[in-house]
Amino acid sequence: MFIVWGKKTVYRKIGHVADFCSICREPRPFKLRRVGSAGHLYYISVGEGELVGYERSCHECGTTFPAQVTTYATVSKSPAPLEDLLNRTFPKLREFYQQRLVLEEAIRHDPAALSQDQRHSLIRAAFVFLSPQVEQRFAATHIDKEITLSMVTAVALAIFAPLVVKAWMPDAPESSRPIFVIIGLLLVGWQIAVSGRRFMRRHIIPGLAKALDPLSPTEDEIQTVMAELKQHRHKIGRKLRLADLQARMRRKPAAAT
Ligand SMILES: [Zn+2]
């Protein structure tokens, strides 16, 4: 008998806190989770496992960052408006992030007035914050809903399409099943091929555009950072299509149009 066992990452929700979001560039409410590593048998784990660390996910943009629980005065069990969470969980947030908040104010006021080095490191930081999500996604085979749908369609085509052909053309000499099997395989292959770009557009580009928009980066500035990340083997540098990012950055909120 084949026994499946090993280590599995286990997440446990702890509560809600206020903290600074480097993608939204503002203090935001966050969901706080404990990350553990537990033994599993057939992917069923017992307990919360050995402590690996903590992470916080922004309620607004969904980006996850490592968290230091000792930073918070307390953790709220339920979600709450930002000011309420701020007062209870991180009352010293504005002191703690004072320099950062001053920098953000300067970005909002006139991003072109920042030095070239400062702009470069701010643009690179936005990519680096989102890089772990890209690494995680491309480290393993990932089946999204479109791939699942294409697989179901491929099976349905192989089973039912030959019957339909036979009913319409009873005199057809050969079974048409192999043709539909090939069409189904091509459909699944195509969906697997485009799933990486789909992931980037859905899960990475919205956050990246949100973080970069206030800096109004030029194409050259973005390309320089992407080349640097590629050189350091960050998958985000390779998987991201500049045109997709630019298209998203050009899309302004409805209120502004
Ligand atoms: Zn955010």
Image (spheres, rainbow, N blue to C red):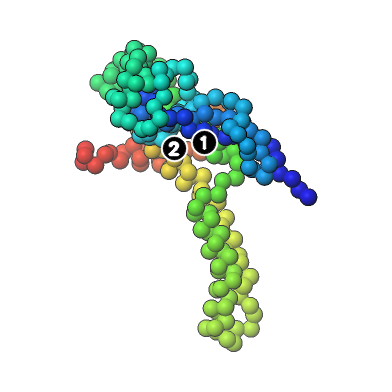
Question: Which residue bears the numbered disc 2?
Answer: 204
| Foreground residue among 74 and 130 | 74
Measured from the top left, where is residue 135 in percent x and y? Answer: 55, 34
Query: Could you tell me if the residues under marks 1 and 2 are in contact, i.e. CB atoms within 8 Å?
Result: yes
Q: Secondary structure at mark 1?
A: helix
Q: Residue at x 76, y 48 (%)?
A: 2
Q: Is mark 1 within 8 Å of ligand 1?
A: no
Q: Which mark is residue 123?
A: none
Query: Left of 171 or right of it: where is 110?
Result: left
Q: Residue at x 55, y 79 (%)?
A: 165
Q: Is mark 2 within 8 Å of ligand 1?
A: no
Q: Residue at x 41, y 35 (%)?
A: 62
Q: Quadrant of the C terminus?
A: top left
Query: Left of 9 or right of it: where is 56?
Result: left
Q: Which mark is residue 134?
A: 1
The amino acid marked with disc number 1 is: Val
Of the residues under marks 1 and 2, which one precedes in the sequence?
A: 1
| Foreground residue among 202 and 49 | 49
Q: Residue at x 34, y 37 (%)?
A: 249
Query: Left of 67 or right of it: where is 104?
Result: left
The amino acid marked with disc number 2 is: Ile
